């Protein structure tokens, strides 16, 4: 069942689900809640983690603000609530937001699949003022890390990357591309990130393809030569002293394995390739004059 079909059923159900108590702050000053107790290490979106995520979302969207509500005619008319309500995965009608929208969304939040939860949390993040988004993302990441979830916010999107070092490698690669003016590799890496964050399942093959293209474009920018394929690019980089033989062999071997195997790449394959390609792009960017 798709998220949209599930949404219409979930919003109409009156079944009560256990939830964490709400904590309120003015909407202009959201209180981002952190986890305080351990949960299962299964890596799934457990009941505890779901409750913590709802506490963050509830405090952000529905914290009392009498002055704001006086001008907007109540919680259901708040601009941030309207933006979230009309965004995926809710995709509701802006003119038909229920007065008890907080209760409706809370019931829905406990019924849907994790992929819908992640999309919803992203919608809340994107509806916040830009200055508040990093704090919101950091709070969500803290909850997900405490709950041993395999997802984290990376570049404004929740994706199956949990390692801080992996996240740092990707962010450094994008920063390096921006620093040296490599728009092509930057766009390819961002596209790979978007494909890894695709729901309900990551586009693993697309991640691998776009990450490898980022390396090919970075090699072309550095060597000023047109390369037939990735293997040719790596050969040129080694010949010009931009990568060591051992490093070139490691990348070449991994890429050859993934492109020659008959099985489709997995999410783990995609994550590994993305991180390795990001690291290589950073290395090449640092080799520019």
Image: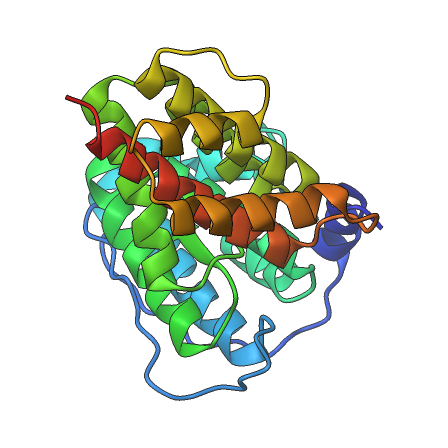
**In percent of the image, x 62 and y 29: which residue is there?**
93
Q: In this view, does 27 lie above or below 231?
A: below
Residue 253 screen position, x and y as percent: 58, 49
**In percent of the image, x 22 and y 30: which residue is there?**
287
**In percent of the image, x 23 and y 44: which residue is there?**
132
Q: Does the image show residue 260?
A: yes
**In percent of the image, x 47 and y 34: which residue is there?**
82
Residue 206 screen position, x and y as percent: 65, 35
> In the displayed image of the protein, which residue is found farthest to the left?
289
210 sits to left or right of 63: right
Residue 278 screen position, x and y as percent: 39, 41
54 sits to left or right of 30: right
Q: Choose between 240 and 253: the one closer to the eye.
A: 240
192 sits to left or right of 21: right
Residue 199 screen position, x and y as percent: 65, 44
Q: In this view, does 36 lie above or below 127?
A: below
């Amino acid at each position: 069942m798709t998220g949209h079909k599930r949404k219409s059923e979930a919003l109409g159900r009156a079944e009560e689900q256990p939830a964490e108590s709400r904590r309120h702050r003015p909407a202009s000053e959201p209180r981002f809640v952190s986890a305080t107790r351990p949960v299962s290490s299964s890596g799934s979106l457990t009941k505890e983690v779901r409750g913590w995520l709802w506490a963050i979302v509830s405090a952000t969207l529905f914290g009392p603000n009498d002055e704001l509500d006086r001008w907007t005619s109540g919680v259901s008319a708040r601009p941030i609530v309207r933006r979230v309500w009309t965004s995926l995965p809710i995709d509701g009608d802006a003119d038909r937001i229920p007065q008890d929208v907080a209760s409706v969304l809370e019931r829905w939040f406990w019924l849907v699949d994790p992929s819908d939860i992640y999309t919803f949390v992203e919608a809340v993040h994107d509806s916040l003022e830009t200055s508040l988004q990093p704090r919101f993302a950091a709070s969500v990441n803290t909850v997900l890390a405490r709950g041993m979830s395999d997802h984290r916010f990376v570049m404004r999107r929740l994706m199956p990357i949990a390692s801080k070092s992996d996240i740092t490698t990707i962010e450094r690669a994008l920063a390096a591309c921006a620093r040296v003016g490599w728009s092509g590799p930057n766009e390819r890496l961002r596209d790979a990130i978007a494909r890894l964050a695709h729901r309900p399942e990551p586009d693993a093959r697309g991640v691998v393809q776009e990450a490898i293209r980022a390396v090919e474009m970075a090699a072309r920018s550095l060597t000023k030569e047109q390369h037939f394929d990735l293997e040719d690019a790596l050969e040129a980089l080694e010949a010009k002293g931009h990568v060591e033989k051992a490093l070139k062999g490691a990348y070449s071997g991994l890429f050859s394995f993934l492109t020659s195997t008959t099985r489709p790449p997995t999410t783990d394959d995609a994550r590994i390739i993305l991180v390795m390609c990001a690291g290589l792009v950073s290395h090449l960017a640092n080799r520019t004059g």
